Every structure is written in structure tokens, then in C-alpha cells.
Amino acid sequence: MPAPHPEPPHHILPLPDGDLHYTQAGAGTDAPILLIHGSLCDYRYWRWQTPAFSDTRRVLAPSLRGCWPGAQSHPQATYAVKRHAGDLAHLLRALDAYGGAHVIGHSRGAQVALALAVQAPDLCRSLTLADPGFRFADEPETPVFYAAAVQRLQAGDTEDALEQFIDTVNGADTWRKMVGWFKDMVRDNAATLLSQIVEANLPVDPRDAAALSCPLLLITGANSPAKYGTRLDRLQQLLPQAQRARIALASHGMNLANPRAFNRAVLDFIADA
């Protein structure tokens, strides 16, 4: 695993009803890369993508509303997928990215990325969805896999709650083996689960997905839980032109477990998008 680079400078973008915290690195006139993290994370999640991608392009890595370092009390109604997507559209326009960005979303961030592409297709030069977990509107609701974690969190058992969540999405015993910086990040964002569960099972309209016109990369870890593969298979059915990538020696957190392979797959895709 590569050594981490120093964190890029932290910026704050005023929004009509709050602030958006983000980092920016790199330069260039090509379309920037926008990195959208998933549950329990923030812009620190991309510590091995930002330096690699910023060698050739401008890279924007926001912390979604309500996440560290702009953490707030939870639950809060503004911690919502569509609101996140609107915030990111505001960010891209504020930074003059009117030609669009290469949008990369991981896990819950993939649903935010898709919502951004639906809300503002002019701002998405390409779209990379890494292990999205959303359901489609024509599928039945399933039990919320992290409901037990939220109950533990509400009871004050934060460590047990986080272990249950992380082990479910990435495989048994993952939390125990995770490095300190990752655990610190997840603890900093633990309360967001209290808001996230409010819109658990938020569906995606398959007609919206099928209408996407930008180049699309669907990416997963070779050892990711099977449910993520079913999401990618359905997206492939809706968008046969989508490209696929499978990251060896990795599960759901494929960009951390095998960053070189993840970065190479994304950069190869972007180069042709």
C-alpha cells in the first residue's frame, strides 16, 4: 500500500443554508475529478486517490453535509441524498466546472453521484459507481441491514455499532483489522447513521438510471458482498454500454485495499471518457 501524502488544503464553501467542507488538489484545464464518499466517511476516505489523481487533474473531495469536519447533531433532515447532490452541483458551479466533472461515488456516495447525474447531467462528464447498494423502485423493500447498528448507537454502544456496520458491508472481522486513521474517521461520523436511517431503502427509479447519457464505469471488489454485484448487474442491464472493473484482492473498500488497481481502472476509464 502506498505511503499517504500530506492532506491537501481544506476549504469551506458557503451554501444558502450551511457550509460545505472540501479539499482541492492538482490543476489543469481538463474536467476535474469529484470524489464522493460513502457512509461513515468524509473526504479523508480518498487519501490514496487524491494524490494519485491530482498528478494530472484537479481533484475535489468534499465531506458531505453533516459529516466531519462539519459534523452536526443528528438526526437532521438535511442529511439526504438529494440534498447532498444539490450541494455538489453548487460546488461544481462555484468552482467554474461548467464543462462537467468525472464523478466518482462509493457505496452510499454512488447513490449521491447518480442523483447528481440525474439532477444536473450537464455537470457529469462521466460517472463511476463503486459498489452502490441502493434498491430500485420496482424492487421490494428489504430489512435495513444497519438497523441493529443504529439501535446500538442510540444505546451508547458506539464501538459495537460501528463494528456491526463495517463488518456487514466489508466482511467479517474487518473492523478489528482496520488501521487507526480509518477507525478515527468512522468514529467522527458515527452519528450520521441516525440521519441516514431516516431514508434507508431510498429507491432509484430505473428509468432515471436508464436515461443516463454520460460514460459509465461500474466497479467492485473481487471479494465484495454479493448484494453489490446484483446492483451492478441491474445497472448493466439498464445501460449495456457501461464498462465494468473488478479490483483484485479487495472487498467493498476496494480503493483502500488495492488503491493502485483502483486508481489505474478509474484513470484508464477517464482517459477515454
Image: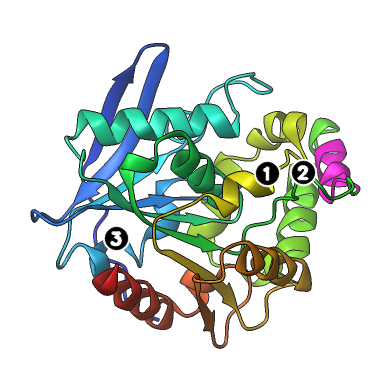
Residue denoted by label 3? 50
Q: Considering the numbered disc 3 on the image, is that residue within a helix, a strand or a loop? A: helix
Q: Which portion, as a residue range, is magenta?
A: 143-152
Query: Mark 1 and mark 2 in contact (Cβ < 8 Å)?
Result: yes
Quadrant for residue 226, please give it: bottom right
Quadrant for residue 266, please give it: bottom left
Residue denoted by label 2? 137
Per the image, is 150 magenta? Answer: yes
Residue denoted by label 1? 204
Q: First in sequence: mark 3 or mark 1?
A: 3
In the image, taking residue 89 as reference, residue 216 lies left or right, namely right
Write the residue at 85% across / 45% down.
144
Q: Considering the numbered disc 1 on the image, is that residue within a helix, a strand or a loop? A: loop
Picture coordinates of residue 219 (x, y %)?
Answer: 53, 71
The residue lying toward the viewer, choosing from 213 and 134, is: 213
Picture coordinates of residue 210 (x, y %)?
Answer: 58, 54
In the image, taking residue 224 as reference, residue 53 lies left or right, namely left
Quadrant for residue 63, please give it: top left
